[in-house]
């Protein structure tokens, strides 16, 4: 069997034009990610190459952000006022909530096409017909088929659908996206103990970049992994506000296990479903345990707890509740946008997302045992 060339972090960094500060920031995480990928023997050659290419893309997108910032120093002066971070367990309606809020033209969410292709910075005058949006949709049409087709059943993907912060944070190499795609336990252990202040410096650079020539009054962003590093987030955004939907973790674990199995399917010929269930059972609980600890230490944090069941039953009312909490005007145009998005995007638009807990070696009792602290804390919202 032919031995592939060893991937080298220095060589990858030399391929892009990054400042010394950016290189120093990304290097520890890049090295940890490469080490974890090289240790994963179950990855196919295609999966290995996909991971390395993603790392290169992350570096290239960060380099583009930094180059534009150097050419236009005024980007660093863009104000980010009271950004709203949606977080919580996966499969709690966070993507739906983010998309509904993103339908409001008065609120800024990062769209998928501009996070994938951020340079040059988006312009308000051409935002609705920027050719990069069509290029992103063409990519989705070409790639989210075959093994990946089921991803669309569980998670909306499109150029004008809000993108999670995971794709932003991974450009700092201090984010969880690679762990979801490729199973990287070594990198995950590194991530848990790392100081991610650099990640949120990069995150802020992104929001300033995207808002420079296409601003709104407020930003609303989302990804579950924010829960793991709230102190670092607050160092970058001291006026941040939080929205945390809640759902029965038994249902959550069945749904997310199926989604991650599908996402990883293009990089692994075989997956151990029981091992996957056990991995995700603890991974997502780690984030909730950290979030609960922060909330106990900081009871003054502005957080709006909400029930997934309420979001599903009354989406308009759920968005109104978020706006009331965050001090954002809920206008007739807001409601019209929300209702329009719901009409255009029914839950089964791409087929039904089906899953069963026992497929992943888990039982209701096992999940409830691991999440006993979460269930006791948020019982009223489940």
Image (cartoon, rainbow, N blue to C red):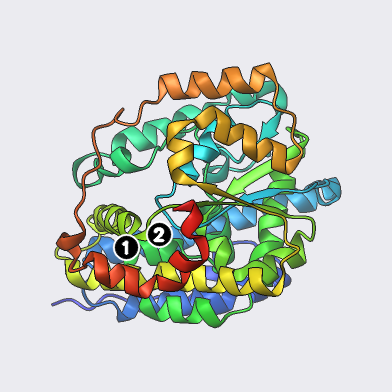
Graded by Cα atoms within 10 Å as few (under 14), some (14 to 19) or many (20 or more), the crowding at tag 2 reads few
Q: Nearer the viewer, residue 18 or 232?
A: 232
> On the rendered image, what quadrant is the N terminus found in?
bottom left
At mark 1, the secondary structure is: helix
Q: Position of residue 44 (x, y in %)?
A: 21, 66
Label 2, label 1: how far apart the Cα atoms are? 6 Å
Q: Is residue 209 above or below residue 195?
A: above
Q: Nearer the viewer, residue 11 or 131?
A: 131
261 relative position to 296: left or right? left
Q: Is residue 203 visible?
A: yes
Residue at image mark 2: 53
Q: Is residue 211 visible?
A: no
**Residue 189, label in figure:** none
Q: Position of residue 159 (x, y in %)?
A: 48, 33
Q: Are marks 2 and 1 in contact (CB under 8 Å)?
A: yes
Q: How many marks?
A: 2
Q: Position of residue 160 (x, y in %)?
A: 51, 31
Task: Name the residue at 72% across, 70% down.
Answer: 298
Q: Is residue 256 above or below residue 40?
A: above
Question: In this view, which residue lies farthest toward the front?
Answer: 380
Q: Nearer the viewer, residue 260 or 5?
A: 260
Residue at image mark 1: 49
Q: Is residue 266 above or below residue 18?
A: above
Q: Position of residue 173 (x, y in %)?
A: 54, 68
Task: Name the residue at 29% across, 30% down.
Answer: 348
Question: Residue 48 occupies which quadrant of the picture?
Answer: bottom left
Question: Residue 277 occupies which quadrant of the picture?
Answer: bottom left
Graded by Cα atoms within 10 Å as few (under 14), some (14 to 19) or many (20 or more), the crowding at tag 1 reads some
At mark 2, the secondary structure is: helix
Task: Name the residue at 57% across, 54% down.
Answer: 168
């Amino acid at each position: 069997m032919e031995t592939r060339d060893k991937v080298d972090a220095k060589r990858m960094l030399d391929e892009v034009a990054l400042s010394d500060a950016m290189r120093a920031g990304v290097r520890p995480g890049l090295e940890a990610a490469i080490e974890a990928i090289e240790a994963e023997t179950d990855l196919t050659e295609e999966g290995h190459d996909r991971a390395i290419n993603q790392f290169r893309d992350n570096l290239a997108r960060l380099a583009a952000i930094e180059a534009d910032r150097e050419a236009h120093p005024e980007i660093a002066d863009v104000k980010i006022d009271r950004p709203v971070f949606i977080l919580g367990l996966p499969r709690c309606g966070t993507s739906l909530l983010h998309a509904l809020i993103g339908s409001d033209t008065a609120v800024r969410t990062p769209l998928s096409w501009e996070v994938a292709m951020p340079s040059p910075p988006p312009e308000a005058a051409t935002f609705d017909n920027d050719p990069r949006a069509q290029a992103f949709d063409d990519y989705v049409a070409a790639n989210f088929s075959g093994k990946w087709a089921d991803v669309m059943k569980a998670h909306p993907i499109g150029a004008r659908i809000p993108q999670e912060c995971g794709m932003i944070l991974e450009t700092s190499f201090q984010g969880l996206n690679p762990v979801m795609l490729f199973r990287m336990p070594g990198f995950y252990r590194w991530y848990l103990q790392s100081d991610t202040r650099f990640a949120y410096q990069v995150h802020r650079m992104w929001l300033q970049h995207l808002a420079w020539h296409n601003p709104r009054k407020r930003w609303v962003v989302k990804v579950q992994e924010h829960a793991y590093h709230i102190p670092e987030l607050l160092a970058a955004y001291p006026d941040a506000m939080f929205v945390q939907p809640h759902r029965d973790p038994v249902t959550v674990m069945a749904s997310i296990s199926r989604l991650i199995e599908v996402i990883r399917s293009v990089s692994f010929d075989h997956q151990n479903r029981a091992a996957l269930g056990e991995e995700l059972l603890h991974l997502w609980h780690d984030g909730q345990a950290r979030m609960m600890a922060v909330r106990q230490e900081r009871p003054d944090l502005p957080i709006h707890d909400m029930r997934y069941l309420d979001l599903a039953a009354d989406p308009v009312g759920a968005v109104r509740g978020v706006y009331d909490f965050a001090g954002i005007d809920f206008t007739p145009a807001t409601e019209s946008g929300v209702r329009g998005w719901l009409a255009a995007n029914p839950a089964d638009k791409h087929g039904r997302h089906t899953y069963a807990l026992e497929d992943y070696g888990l039982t209701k009792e096992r999940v409830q045992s691991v999440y006993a602290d979460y269930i006791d804390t948020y019982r009223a919202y489940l």
